[in-house]
C-alpha cells in the first residue's frame, strides 16, 4: 500500500480544523499553537491520521508529531519499517 503522507496529514487536519488555511501553514509551525487546537482536538487529529495511514500514533509520541514536517516524517518512518 502506498500512502501519500502529506495528503493524509492534510486530510486529518482538515477533519479537525476545516477552516484552517493549510497552504499558509509553515511546515515547522507547532500545529496545536498555529491552528489553536486544544489537547482533545490534537488527540482527534492523531486518531484521524492513524485511521488514514494505518500507522498507530500512541499519545506518548504526541511530542514527536508537533509540526506538519514532524508528522510526515513520523508516519513515513513507520510505513517504511513495516
Image (tube, grey):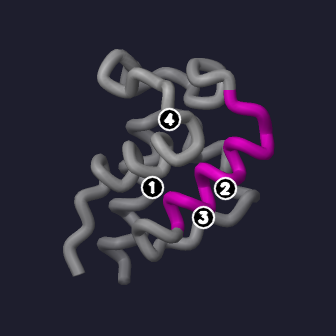
Q: Main secondary structure of the magenta part?
A: helix
At 67% from the left and 53% from the top, the residue drawn is 44
Of pointers 4 and 3, the one earlier in the residue sequence = 4
Of pointers 2 and 1, the one earlier in the residue sequence = 2
For the residues labelled 2 and 1, say whether their Cβ atoms are less than 8 Å apart: yes
Of pointers 3 and 1, the one earlier in the residue sequence = 3
Which residue is more in the foreground, 77 or 18?
18
> In the rendered view, would you say 34 is above or below 50?
above
Query: Closer to us: mark 4 or mark 3?
Result: 4
Quadrant of res 25: top left
At 57% from the left and 72% from the top, the residue drawn is 56
At 51% from the left and 70% from the top, the residue drawn is 51
The local crowd at label 2, few if under 14, some if 14 to 19, many if 20 or more residues have their Cα within 10 Å, is: few
Q: Residue furthest front?
A: 19
Instruction: For mark 3, give the secondary structure.
Output: loop
Was residue 42 drawn as part of the magenta stretch in this picture?
yes
For the residues labelled 3 and 1, say whether their Cβ atoms are less than 8 Å apart: yes
13 with respect to 57 (left or right): left
At 60% from the left and 50% from the top, the residue drawn is 45
For mark 1, what is the residue? Answer: 74
For mark 2, what is the residue? Answer: 61
Instruction: For mark 4, give the secondary structure.
Output: loop
Of pointers 4 and 1, the one earlier in the residue sequence = 4
The local crowd at label 3, few if under 14, some if 14 to 19, many if 20 or more residues have their Cα within 10 Å, is: many
Distance from Cα at disc 2 to Cα at disc 3? 6 Å
Query: Which portion, as a residue range, is magenta?
Result: 37-50
Q: Position of residue 33 (x, y in %)?
A: 65, 21
Q: Position of residue 76 (x, y in %)?
A: 34, 60
Amino acid at each position: 500500500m502506498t500512502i501519500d503522507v502529506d495528503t493524509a496529514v492534510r486530510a486529518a487536519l482538515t477533519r479537525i480544523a476545516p477552516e484552517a488555511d493549510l497552504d499558509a501553514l509553515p511546515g515547522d509551525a507547532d500545529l496545536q499553537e498555529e491552528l489553536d487546537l486544544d489537547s482533545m482536538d490534537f488527540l482527534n487529529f492523531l486518531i484521524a491520521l492513524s485511521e488514514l495511514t494505518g500507522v498507530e500514533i500512541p499519545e506518548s509520541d504526541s511530542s514527536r508529531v508537533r509540526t506538519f514536517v514532524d508528522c510526515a516524517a513520523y508516519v513515513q518512518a513507520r510505513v517504511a519499517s513495516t
